[in-house]
Amino acid sequence: MRKRLIKLLTAICVTTIAIGGLAGCGTKSDSDASGSKSSGNGEKVTLTFGSHQSGLPTSGVVQELAKTFEAETGIKVDFQISPDAQWRDLLKVKLDSGEAPDIFCADADPLNLVTRVNPEKYVEDVTNEEWVKRMDPNVIPSISYNDKVYGITFPGKKMYFYIYNKEVFQNLGLKVPTNYQEFKNVCEKIKDSGVIPIYEGTQNGWHQVLPLFETGAMYQQKHPDLYNKLNKNEIDLDSVSELQTIIGQLKEFAELGFYGENYLSNSVENAKEAIAKGKAAMFIAESAWRNEVKADFPDFDINKLGIFVMPWGDNQAIGVNPASNAYFINKKGKHVEEAKKFFDFLAKPENLQKRLDGQPGLSELCWPEIKSKYTKEDQAYIDSLKKGMVMQAGVKYIDSQWMDVGKDLEAMYTGSLTPKQVLETIMNRRTEQAELQKDPDWNK
């Protein structure tokens, strides 16, 4: 049975070339066979590190740090990277079968940590490690359970904006929109000029969902105690009229051609080219995404790009997501102490700085001792905004259906679903998931 399971895992795991070595989809038996054994035998140790694609910076900075760690300690880190779409299920299989890597990456937030990694059963408790108290207190709930800390995380709070081409706006005499009607007027003028107003990466599935749930700060402003009421099943999403409004507005923008003719074939990966070459004027991303544009198109002046709050539903608040991916130590692994040493190494101030410097798409770390990369202009703008937690980090059974919602919106764009049906589908899915989890608030 175990051999069949290993074959299954090997079949669905994608190997990648990591900087400094070949990252395969091995098991502990594979690692032992290569000669890497417990340090107790006086031989070199290899830590296996499992992750999904988006769990590690594309720049390879973590792999570079791992090479330095190996040079200092003799402990090698073998990265095993799987597709984003497969990782959550694959990780559960590996944990349940006892074949999980020594260190694994997982999306972490207060609502879903238990269902994703079952920390009390599978994860080493790191509460008393020195570096825990140096992390931003706001991220601790995302990596904790029952007052114990189980993981380490690095990215700072996520905030999504519209990245926009200032030059296009200036040439057309446009101002940053602060409500939906202004946004609509801006897009109309940009379209008339021959430029695609908004680049939407529909092919990736997750990107088109951002306007719905990143605007959670506005929903909370207009509906007191909203998240608590939703989590207790006292109200449902149809009580948030602004959510239905935004779904309808997304459809209207598609029908007006504001995403361009072939937007259903667009991918997030091609957005940088569209913006750098002036094919499109706006794209939803974190502010530091501009640095990724610069990295791929060195001749492009990123000072041409500014940021503004997504004005869907007349929103003017910024959604803040304190959650991100985090790294955890397999407490049933053979190299727990060596894994802790790697975490200690990553948490050194000089290595935190290297991580921020080596990750173009990151604006800040959740480590207050490291200064952020925000410009004075961006920081002043961000400081001026009202803020609130995004819906997927504060409301149960939202994040777990994120990719499904992306498909719902695509079906709406193609005419298979109406905006009302999209919302009804999201609500029904929440109910199904709550009942599956035997949530007491859905089984009164």
Image (cartoon, rainbow, N blue to C red):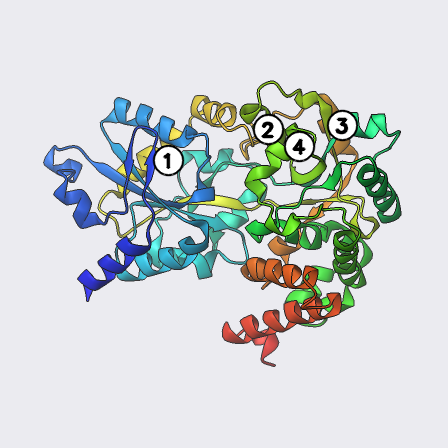
Residue 53 on image: x %, y %: 43, 43
Comparing 194 with 63, the one in front is 194
Q: Residues within 10 Å of mark 1 (few under 14, many from 20)?
A: many
Q: Which residue is mark 4?
A: 275
- Give the quarter of the figure containing the C terminus: bottom right
SS type, badge 2: helix
Residue 138 on image: x %, y %: 59, 43
Residue 177: image quadrant is top right
**Upstream in sequence: badge 4 or badge 2:** 4
Q: Amino acid at mark 4?
A: Ile
Q: Amino acid at mark 2?
A: Val
Q: Which mark is residue 343?
A: 1
Q: Is residue 301 above or below residue 260?
A: above
Q: CA distance from mark 1 to mark 4?
A: 37 Å
Residue 286: image quadrant is top right
Q: Which residue is mark 2?
A: 293
**Upstream in sequence: badge 2 or badge 1:** 2
Q: Residue at x 61, y 61 (%)?
A: 405
User: Going by the picture, which residue comes out furthest to the bottom?
Assistant: 444
Q: Is residue 25 left or right of residue 38?
A: right
Q: Residue at x 84, y 49 (%)?
A: 314
> Marks 4 and 2: CB-CB under 8 Å?
yes
Q: Residues within 10 Å of mark 4 (few under 14, many from 20)?
A: many
Q: Which residue is mark 3?
A: 380
Q: Residue at x 28, y 55 (%)?
A: 11
Q: Amino acid at mark 1?
A: Phe
**Upstream in sequence: badge 3 or badge 2:** 2
**Upstream in sequence: badge 3 or badge 1:** 1
Q: Is residue 399 left or right of residue 248?
A: left
**Closer to the camera: disc 3 or disc 4?**
4
